[in-house]
Amino acid sequence: MTEALGQLRWYVKRLSVMEPEEVLHRLLDQWALKAMHVRYTVAGNASRAGRHNSAHYAFCAGAERQLPDLPWAFDPDDKAVAALLNGQGSALGCRWRWRRDAAAWHSAPDTGRRWPKTFFASIPHRTGNPFGDVRIAWEPSRLQHLVVLGLIADSVTGGRGDQAAILLKDQLCSWAGANPPLQGIHYVSAMECALRILALCHATDLARAALIRLGQAEPVWQALLGIVDSHASLIARRPSLHSSRGNHTVAEGAGLVYAGLLFPELEGAARWSEAGLALLERESDHQIAPDGGGVEQSFWYLQLIVDLYGLVIALLTHRQQAVHSAIVQAHARGRQFLTSFAARPDGLPAIGDGDHGYALSETLRLSYASIDTPSQVQHRQFPLPRLDVRTFGESGYTLMRDEARQIDVIVDHGPLGMAPSYGHGHADALSVIVRRGGESLLIDPGTGTYTGDARWRTYFRGTRAHNTVTVDGQDQAVQETPFIWSHPYAVTIVRREVTPDGGFRLLVRHDGYGRLTPGVEHWRAIVHRPPGHWLIWDRLDGQGRHTLDLHWHCGTEPLTELGVVVFPGRPDAMAMAVGGGEVTWHRGERDPLCGWRSQVYGATEPITTIRAHYFGSLPHEFATQLWCGKRRPDEWEAELPLLREWVRKGVYAAAQS
């Protein structure tokens, strides 16, 4: 009964963000699912394997590679290769190991329970299901580890190379036998089917020469053809549209393009490639903003989308087919955005949701190849003497880079996420991230889970898990379900200026707490003064008495010296002092959750979180200072009258508008 009520509440919330056109679309989809279920029941569990004659398919003919060469970061050590060849791997934050029985593909890595092998749409998989986090179970079945086996088979002659090719064949055939079309959790998401198509096409293409030489190719082609046929047919019937348009849509478009172009002999191929390209073209301007940021306010999913576009561009170019300019331009601006913040995938800040999933493989470097490093890009475009600043106005981020001291300060002044549900966004307005060199000092703690323990999902996407201020213990927006927010906030850049001495000031505000009674407005200023001095100033305006909590989540373990927080590791270590409230330190606390990070989806670990607490009347101010070296700057008091005047003028301007 509890589970049924939970499902009913979810459907009510989901319907609340739909337009009438989408409601009709969903109703028709439900009827289609019922018809599909009937056909599934009548047909039984018969697999499509063996229904295709591989001799009739160009992709399966000969040892010559069919796909373009891609840039890989592939240099595994002997221990990693041995583990992979022994069937050992990971399912995000959990261990996973392949076995030669079908159970390997249906066991929940996080709980050890068994996911049902029944019609996919009848399996409960959302939060509160009795089996586990479905995203963790999906990870091994994306079969992206087979791409690594393909790379080994392609690059190592004999021995381990042959072993990798045979293991690839065994696991592929095992998956096909254990997952007949429409049966089990791996058909729940059309996106999962699409990513599996991409992985299998590249894995088998990389290993084809070894497979042919070893006489192992035919079962591989049979399994591949059956999977591509069944998966593309399902994707074409169930694309993510309307309020679900997001990274899923782009993945599904890419999967349809691959299936249609590489297997034109299949019955639906022409429709698949046409529909896939239309999806990708239509979504290009929607998914990637004019400044290159992502509509979902998630750096990880932007990287996924950019890689997917890059794979399709590479495939079309390799096959000497035209690529629509909208796709090329979206890919280019997305790459520029990503490489402004990081030189490799694991260097991206964990802003917004991120499930550590890849378009093809974690070894792929498609979006980071043959492009200037972030420092080169910033220096060329913003040749300030001491501080490089770039504001991404449409997506809502400001990056301040002190090249001399290798300090990055990232300010989040973007929207909550993609309307109308804002699903992958976090309530992180005005949050600040600080990095120095390759070390993260003040961090976004990550995502944790989607459909696992609801407490972790609520915490990691909420305001308390970000470097900003909470009011009365509330989030800046309201969490309705694990992927739906209501009461979205608006963020405004009030003023920004470069000072004659090479410093910088930025004032931003958000109205997320305007819904409280009485309403509260949060203003935050970030001020840089050379050499290496920073002030983060918070002002909370409103009426009445409120509880205010300023959180700073530490990515490296700090020390404390006479009330000063020190991030050790360099002779000129960065230090931090927090004023405006009672300062306490928290680590790995569970009631309530505080002092945690999730570096990998599905796993959590304790960190130090520093909190400044205030209860009383408004207005109230916090002041956080950061500096390099032992000498604490003493010039900040002179800044405060100017910042207060900026706030006063901002209030007046807002009232006039």
Image (spheres, rainbow, N blue to C red):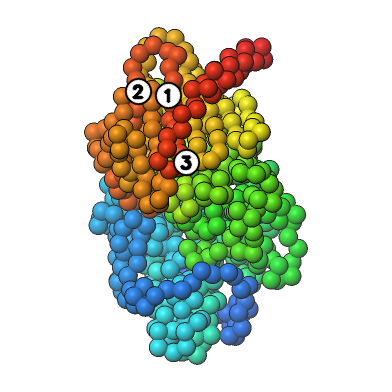
Tell which of 579 and 454 is nearer to you.
579
Q: Residue at x 44, y 20 (%)?
A: 621
Q: Callout 2, which amino acid?
A: Gly
The answer to whether one can see residue 426 in this image is no
Split into 4 quadrants, where in the image is the N terminus? top left
Q: Which numbered disc covers residue 622?
A: 1
Residue at figure coordinates x 61%, y 28% from the top left: 493
Residue at the spot 71% in from the left edge and 67% down from the top edge? 317
**SS at mark 2 in the image:** loop
Q: Residues within 10 Å of mark 2 (few under 14, many from 20)?
A: some
Tell me residue 566's x, y (percent): 36, 42
Q: Secondary structure at mark 3?
A: strand
Q: CA distance from mark 3 to mark 1?
A: 17 Å
Q: Residues within 10 Å of mark 3 (few under 14, many from 20)?
A: many
Task: Say whether marks 2 and 1 touch (CB < 8 Å).
Answer: yes
Q: Is residue 337 left or right of residue 626?
A: right
Q: Position of residue 135 (x, y in %)?
A: 39, 52
Residue 374: x, y in percent? 60, 54
N-terminal label among 2 and 1: 2
- Of discs 2 and 3, which sits in the foreground? 2
Q: Is residue 408 visible?
A: yes
Marks 2/3: CA–CA distance: 21 Å
Q: Quadrant of residue 331?
A: bottom right
Query: Which residue in the structure is indicated by mark 2?
Result: 581
17 or 71, which is in the foreground?
71
Nearer to us of marks 3 and 1 is 1
Residue on which disc 3 sits? 433
Q: Amino acid at mark 1?
A: Phe
Judge whether 409 appears above or below 582 on screen. below
Give the amino acid at mark 3. Answer: Ile
SS at circle 1: strand
| Mark toward the start of the polypeptide (3 vs 1) | 3
